[in-house]
Amino acid sequence: MRRGTFWSWLWIALGVIYFFVPLVGSFTFSLHAKLGVLSFKAYSDVLQDPNFRINFFASVAWALSTIVIGVLLFVPTAYWVRLKLPRVRPLVEFITLLPFVVPAIVLVYGLVRTFSRPPLMIVNSPFLLIFGYTIMSMPYMYRAVDTGLRAVDVPVLTEAAQSLGAGWVTIMLRVVFPNIRVAVLSGSFLTFAIVMGEYTLAQWLAKPAFGPYMALVALTKAYEPSACAIISFALTWAAMGIMQFVGRGAPGGAQVAGAH
Amino acid sequence: MPFLRLSHLSKDFAQTAAVQDFNLDIEKGELVTFLGPSGCGKTTTLRMVAGFELPTQGRVELNGVDITTQPPNRRNVGMVFQSYALFPNMTVGDNIGFGLRVSHRPQKEIRERIEEMLRTIRMPDLSKRFPYQLSGGQQQRVALARALAIKPQVLLLDEPLSALDAKIRVELRFEIRRIQRELGITTIYVTHDQEEALSLSDRVVVMSAGRIEQVGAPFEIYNYPATPFVAGFVGTLNQLRCRVIDAARGKLAFDGQEFVTTTPLQPSDTSVTVMIRPEQLHLGTLQGENHLTGKVDAVAFLGSVVRMVIRLGESVVTLDVLNTRGLALPKVGSDVPLSFPAQSSWILGER
């Protein structure tokens, strides 16, 4: 084995240990719910808890709504910026990165302050939570879509479609969307993963969600929080796996996690 | 009334004028080429016809209708792009049928039209392929079929062959002309390649710096350039700065050597620039022609033609000789005699 190869493998090994040891630890710990034997008792307890189901499926609903709104909002925006407003791209990119700079707690405080008084009293509406999530997922969704658009010659394809008689809706549905399908999917799954684990917004807007549920379980139970953590990990990985699978062999190339 | 009329078209981008006072009438079925260096405004003019650019001034009239402000998707104008611009998510057949699907034509008609177009571009079996499975030349054929499938009133081609290699380029050039003639479709072709423009067009519009320099048939443009720009841009041209010795008898001096021209001259003892094409000059001393002597500076074998650069004092002239198997190429540095007929030279602006 060459010296360079040895060091490469060593760093990979260290990385894998750093990442997997806590995971394996959590997993083995979660199997010890029954004294003296290894069992999936913690998992069955979690899955049978009606609160788990309520909160889990609430989060799924939030995530799907966020994805729909995000796609409808960011795909046309990114498209339009690329096509007609290339000069404002730096500004738009800066705005899309704001959620990385503004902590969730500041965001939720601002949302509550603004929308708990007229003219828009929607603090109790689930839409406030979904819009909040849309903002939080913006860096991932927007950048994934933008990366996807970069891979196709958007202005020329648009002009080609126009010269063939297509209007804007046709261009969006038949030309733009199909060619950035993988990028949109990748943004969607990242959004899904983020929303499923989100805590701050759901907690402060007092809505059922998987994040606050896990936090609550962590305070009151011993083995179940580990089981929850593993479930949520599995979910994220499944999302990534689907993303890779769908992206395979798509024309224009797959770019998973185009966000960074 | 011409089929397509462009009158006083101008386009400014920020402070710069891309196109200025462009006037042109195009008849039905004609193939007109816009020829010029990059940045001369030829593509901008084409895009104003397509509807992708709004003219700052002027009008575009198609078949008697003012379409200056009509959006591109209402004009029924087919466009072929340099980068092919095929939809990567669609098969060849779907690409060709796109325009017909958009206008909700019946399925049967769409299918038949796709097959007809595939036959026209001589790719009948490739309907199910995706663009990335085709060569550049094939992709551009499909792009042409797609633009023609909607039976456009005008076909616009924006440097369609620039991205292809030399051999395919020549092949496809004749293919485009054949299809254009067969369908009798009015066509505007943008190119910076003079050979393409000359070999393809009914008329050539030579442009420079946003203005029309000359409009004419290829033969006219090449043999009777109207401006110094056209003379310099289209083909290779020897420009000899000569002194008039005897205007009445057409006698001129170049590099101390005398010759005659049939072109009317200005009064004696003035300076004029005399033009002569490289193919009009030949090696040797032919009876009844002008004779000059020079030194061979360079010899370039181009295949069908041998191009030589001959030094005459301070200046050089280019000379083309048709290749033959028995041709004896002169050595670089040797002295050679040249001759050319008196009527082959001309002075710009004279006809």
Image: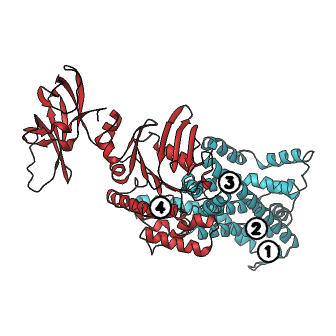
Q: Which mark is residue A76?
A: 3
Q: Write down the quadrant of residue A125 in the picture.
A: bottom right
Q: Residues within 10 Å of mark 2 (few under 14, many from 20)?
A: many
What residue is shown at x 66% (from left), y 53% (from top)? A142
User: What type is the residue that disc 1 sits on?
Assistant: Ala
Q: Nearer the viewer, residue A47 or B93?
A: B93
The residue where tag 2 is placed is A226
Quick check: do tags 4 and 1 share a chain? no
Real-space Cα distance between discs 1 and 3?
45 Å
Residue B274 x/y as whole percent: 23, 31
Q: Indicate the secondary structure of the residue bearing disc 4.
A: helix
For mark 4, name the chain: B
Colour red maps to chain: B
Real-space Cα distance between discs 3 and 2?
41 Å
The residue where tag 1 is placed is A42
What residue is shown at x 17% (from left), y 25% (from top)? B248
- Compare marks 3 and 2 and give the one earlier in the sequence: 3
- Compare marks 2 and 1 and give the one earlier in the sequence: 1
Tell which tag, 2 or 4, sits nearer the viewer: 4
For mark 3, name the chain: A
